[in-house]
Image (cartoon, rainbow, N blue to C red):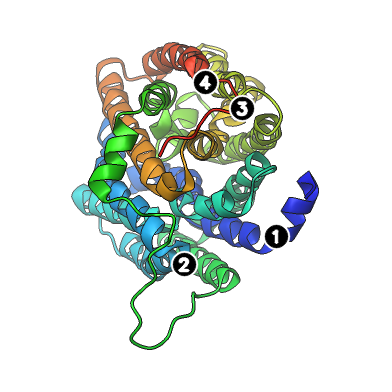
């Protein structure tokens, strides 16, 4: 089968995964930052206090391994059904808040936990199951969906908040999530079984949890990827609740910040397409190192005193070029080095380290703002960690015939 022929023959699972991811956690990472300046202003929260919202990522560390394992055992449809039903209710919770910061944190915890069942961790399995030659490009397509929607949703949400308030805007996001999730489930189709029949156990998943996780954790490749991802993703909180706050801190208006976020979202699309095509054709470690290392330049520019809209827009474009590729790269690396029967179990652990990194990054941002009242020290710090982590990716096996783990 040809490269494009594989894409054409698997358009249905590709569309399902794209809609599922496009209206879940990856999209919320873009849109949550739009609400931040308005909530801070209305409720009188400090920026350093609001930065602690990133600590909610810690709760997912205990959930993601179960989500990954259940996806290996039960399949995408059953796991995604739970999140599709519950995520819209989380936005209702957001809309009902009254200014208690701990209630806002609780809502964020629930969104992170429930949204994990409809995010890339779950839906990327559809790509691992159906694609071989065009796996990198297929992962790019599903992870581009949130960025495409964000280019429309971010300016629209800011306009809605200014004209109608943030409560109706939260409800609007709940509707977007529900429609996208239901459509994705319809495209996947519910697995058929007779009344009273137990859910089928995939033939590819034979080992016990202890055996499979033992294989994963004893792998040198696993720890290289984990360490590299930790270093290159320490900046994660900047792309969710803190993005607009950081941009406004550089002296631009909330509407200009929303427009810059659209440029950033466009950068993620360009970066993902380039990265996906390159992963299918060139050395995995080299492509990964280049893709994950580019944000270092953008963060140096953002931390400098060059606070003009063109410079900020260009810097965010550079950041987006690489940040948009990390979900694709993580899933591709797992599919490249690990067997399908433990794909989601391994990917679940990978996602754990990214959320742990996000929580540590959030605490670092909060401390930086408290001590310096500026994002610049943190931006220079992550420029260094990104550079080190990108170089570490080069130690991964380069042989195409590498025997997969598991």
| Closest to the observer, 266 or 1 | 1
Identify whether 232 is placed above or below 97.
Answer: above
| Residue 399 percent location from the top left of the image | 59, 22
| Closest to the observer, 226 or 191 | 191
Whether residue 195 can be seen here: yes
Q: Are marks 3 and 1 in contact (CB under 8 Å)?
A: no
| Closest to the observer, 156 or 42 | 156
Identify the residue at image location x=36%, y=73%. 199
| Residue 43 percent location from the top left of the image | 28, 48
Element at badge 2?
helix
The residues tagged by marks 3 and 1 sit, at their Cα atoms, a distance apart of: 26 Å
Which one is earlier in the sequence, the residue at label 4 or at label 2? 2
Q: Are marks 1 and 2 in contact (CB under 8 Å)?
A: no
| Closest to the observer, 279 or 118 | 279
Identify the residue at image location x=40%, y=39%. 406
The disc placed on residue 397 is 4
Element at badge 3?
loop
Residue highlighted by disc 2: 77
Relative to residue 92, is residue 30 drawn left or right?
right
Identify the residue at image location x=25%, y=16%. 371
Identify whether 339 is placed above or below 87.
Answer: above
User: Which-is-in-front pick, marks 3 and 1?
Assistant: 3
Q: Are marks 1 and 4 in contact (CB under 8 Å)?
A: no
User: Which-is-in-front pick, marks 2 and 3?
Assistant: 3
Identify whether 80 is placed above or below 2.
Answer: below
| Residue 114 percent location from the top left of the image | 34, 58
The residues tagged by marks 1 and 4 sit, at their Cα atoms, a distance apart of: 31 Å
User: Which-is-in-front pick, marks 1 and 4?
Assistant: 4
């Amino acid at each position: 089968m040809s490269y494009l022929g594989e894409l054409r023959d698997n358009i249905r699972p590709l569309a399902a995964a794209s809609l599922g991811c496009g209206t879940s956690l990856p999209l919320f990472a873009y849109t949550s930052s739009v609400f931040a300046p308005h909530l801070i202003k209305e409720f009188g929260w400090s920026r350093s206090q609001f930065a602690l919202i990133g600590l909610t990522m810690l709760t997912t560390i205990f959930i993601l391994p179960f989500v990954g394992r259940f996806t290996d055992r039960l399949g995408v449809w059953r796991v995604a059904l739970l999140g599709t039903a519950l995520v819209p209710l989380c936005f209702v919770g957001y809309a009902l808040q009254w200014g208690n910061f701990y209630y806002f944190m609780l809502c964020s915890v629930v969104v992170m936990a429930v949204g994990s069942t409809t995010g890339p961790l779950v839906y990327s399995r559809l790509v691992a199951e159906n694609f071989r030659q065009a796996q990198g490009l297929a992962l790019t397509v599903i992870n581009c969906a949130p960025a495409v929607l964000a280019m429309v949703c971010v300016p629209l949400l800011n306009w809605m908040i200014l004209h109608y308030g943030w409560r109706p805007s939260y409800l609007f996001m709940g509707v977007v999530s529900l429609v996208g999730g239901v459509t994705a489930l319809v495209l996947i189709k519910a697995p058929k079984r007779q009344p009273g029949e137990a859910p089928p156990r995939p033939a590819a998943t034979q080992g016990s949890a202890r055996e499979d996780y033992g294989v994963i954790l004893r792998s040198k490749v696993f720890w290289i990827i984990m360490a590299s991802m930790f270093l290159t993703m320490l900046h994660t909180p900047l792309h969710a609740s803190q993005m607009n706050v950081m941009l406004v801190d550089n002296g631009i208006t909330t509407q200009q910040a929303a427009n810059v976020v659209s440029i950033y979202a466009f950068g993620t699309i360009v970066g993902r397409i380039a990265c996906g095509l390159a992963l299918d054709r060139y050395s995995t470690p080299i492509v990964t190192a280049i893709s994950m290392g580019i944000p270092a330049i953008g963060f140096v520019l953002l931390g400098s005193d060059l606070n003009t809209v063109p410079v900020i827009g260009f810097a965010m474009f550079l950041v987006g070029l690489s940040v948009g590729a990390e979900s694709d790269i993580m899933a591709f690396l797992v599919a490249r080095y690990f067997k399908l029967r433990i794909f989601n179990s391994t990917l679940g652990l990978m996602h754990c380290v990214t959320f742990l990194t996000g929580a540590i990054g959030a605490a670092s941002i909060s401390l930086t703002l408290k001590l310096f009242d500026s994002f610049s020290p943190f931006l220079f710090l992550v420029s260094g960690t990104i550079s080190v982590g990108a170089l570490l990716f080069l130690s991964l096996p380069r042989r195409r015939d590498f025997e997969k783990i598991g």
